[in-house]
Image (spheres, helix red, strand yellow):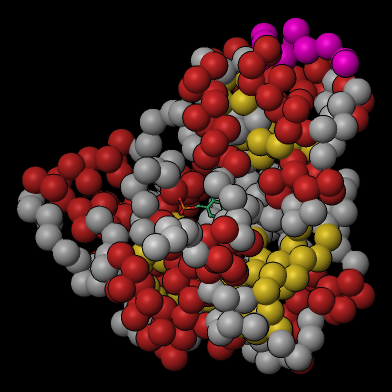
């Protein structure tokens, strides 16, 4: 007998981001690697969860999501973006948007299909495509504004293209795709009869007047878009694992089947709390964005002072930086130096690229942290010297 892992499982590595969090703990470093807030979740949302547990909402919810949460998801999408969503036939609640993405891809991809995605990319998309048997094709986003070349995008679409993954606002770059850019993508989707799978988990975290445009609101796109979102970032509850996919009924049926056999369902009492959270007034989201803007404006000068070239994010809560000015051309060695000697954990840029060499002069900082954490990072980073 030979015991071995599957070919699929051998084609990708452990998550570098989650690994950096473990290293941060090991070295007592300030953790600016993984994107989770170190400040409390909203009191009203926590109270709703406590009440749901006390009221014995403790058994399986409907596999594709508690009706109250699905209705809140539909209500919120229509309120914000003006498009009606049917909570009975177009919404699937999952264990985080992470499960929504893999369930969606497993539901629509066949072996040999191709999936287009932009790079640098959120590191889950590569393994998600591989687990679905598909081949990822990456299109570069170019700093400093992380724009893409429309000709390069067009060249990435071919007869086997089944879908494109779009993340806006984007992790790790903070890029917010403009309506014009999304229209360029939409045109290719329609021309190649491809789906758009959009990760919109940072929809409310926007700066400098940038606006979030959901792909599903563009003409002719609702019927070919799977919109993925979740509670993690908007309500500062990354540990709750509540996410969802909005998709046309025929795709929703497939996503629901895959989801059911992957996980059965997301935590029932937390779904009830989600129903309350999604009905929070607009002021909540304004304050969320304002708080993150403050943190962004706090971190950017710290990084520049320390010798990084920092690319100013338009959305989300990360800063991509260039480390060349510090004399480093090996992001992994630099990140190790930073966590072990300086006491700050970041994510090496190479983990966001298919070809690691493309990211070897970049590292990503997360700023979803309270003032004390950022102040401590400032103190430690002031000790960083060029190599
Ligand atoms: C772009 C993006 N999508 C998805 C996730 C994970 O979200 P969830 O907690 O809903 O699984 C993250 C977390 O960092 C992310 O940055």
* Observer able to see residue 158: yes
> At x 52% / y 39%, what residue is drawn?
18
- On the image, the x and y values in percent for residue 233 come to 49, 47
Picture layout, residue 103 above or below residue 320: below
Taking the image as shown, residue 374 lies to the left or right of residue 6, namely right
Q: How many marks?
A: 0
Percent coordinates x, y for residue 40 in the rendering: 39, 31
Question: Which residue is located at x 50 percent, y 64 percent?
Answer: 6
For residue 135, side relative to residue 142 (left or right)? left
Residue 11: quadrant of the picture: bottom right
Q: Residue furthest front?
A: 1
Say if 81 sits above or below 275 in the image: below
Quarter occupied by residue 164: bottom right
Residue 315 in view here: no
**Residue 69 falls within the magenta-colored stretch:** no
**Horizontal and vertical percent for residue 364?**
70, 37
Q: Which residues are magenta?
A: 377-387
Tell me the quarter of the picture where residue 334 sits: top right
Please state, as top left, top right, bottom left or bottom right, where the C terminus lies in the image: top right
Q: Residue 315's x, y, as percent? A: 67, 48
Q: Where, quadrant-wise, is the N terminus in this rendering?
A: bottom left
Residue 66 vs residue 45, the one in the foreground: 66
The residue under the point 82% across, 32% down is 330
- Magenta residue check for 382: yes
């Amino acid at each position: 007998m030979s015991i071995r892992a599957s070919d699929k499982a051998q084609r990708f590595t452990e998550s570098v981001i989650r690994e950096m969090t473990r290293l941060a703990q090991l070295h007592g470093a300030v953790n600016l690697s993984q994107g989770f807030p170190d400040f409390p979740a909203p009191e009203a949302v926590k109270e709703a969860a406590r009440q749901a547990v006390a009221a014995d909402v403790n058994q399986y919810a409907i596999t594709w999501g508690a009706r109250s949460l699905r209705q809140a998801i539909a209500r919120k999408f229509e309120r914000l973006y003006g498009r009606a969503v049917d909570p009975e036939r177009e919404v699937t609640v999952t264990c985080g948007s992470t499960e929504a993405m893999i369930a969606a891809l497993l539901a629509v991809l066949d072996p040999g299909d191709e999936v287009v995605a932009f790079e640098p990319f959120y590191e889950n998309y590569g393994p998600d495509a591989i687990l679905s048997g598909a081949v990822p094709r990456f299109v570069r986003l170019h700093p400093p504004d992380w724009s893409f070349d429309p000709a390069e995008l067009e060249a990435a679409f071919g007869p086997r293209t089944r879908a494109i993954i779009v993340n806006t606002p984007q992790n790790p770059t903070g890029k917010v795709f403009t309506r014009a850019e999304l229209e360029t993508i939409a045109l290719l989707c329609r021309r190649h009869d491809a789906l758009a799978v959009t990760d919109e988990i940072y929809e409310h975290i926007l700066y400098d007047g940038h606006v979030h445009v959901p792909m599903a609101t563009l003409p002719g796109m609702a019927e070919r878009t799977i919109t993925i979102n979740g509670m993690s970032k908007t309500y500062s509850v990354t540990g709750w694992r509540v996410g969802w996919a909005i998709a046309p009924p025929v795709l929703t049926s497939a996503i629901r089947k895959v989801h059911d056999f992957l996980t059965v369902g997301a935590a029932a009492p937390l779904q009830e709390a989600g129903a309350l959270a999604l009905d929070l007034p607009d002021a909540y989201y304004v304050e969320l964005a304002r708080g993150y803007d403050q943190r962004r404006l706090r971190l950017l000068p710290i990084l520049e002072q320390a010798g990084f070239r920092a690319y100013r994010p338009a959305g989300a809560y990360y800063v991509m930086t260039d480390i060349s000015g510090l004399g480093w051309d090996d992001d992994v060695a630099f990140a190790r130096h930073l966590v072990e000697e300086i006491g700050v954990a970041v994510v090496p840029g190479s983990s966001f690229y298919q070809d690691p060499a493309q990211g070897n002069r970049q590292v990503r900082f997360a700023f979803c942290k309270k003032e004390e954490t950022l102040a401590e990072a400032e103190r430690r980073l002031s000790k960083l010297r060029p190599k």
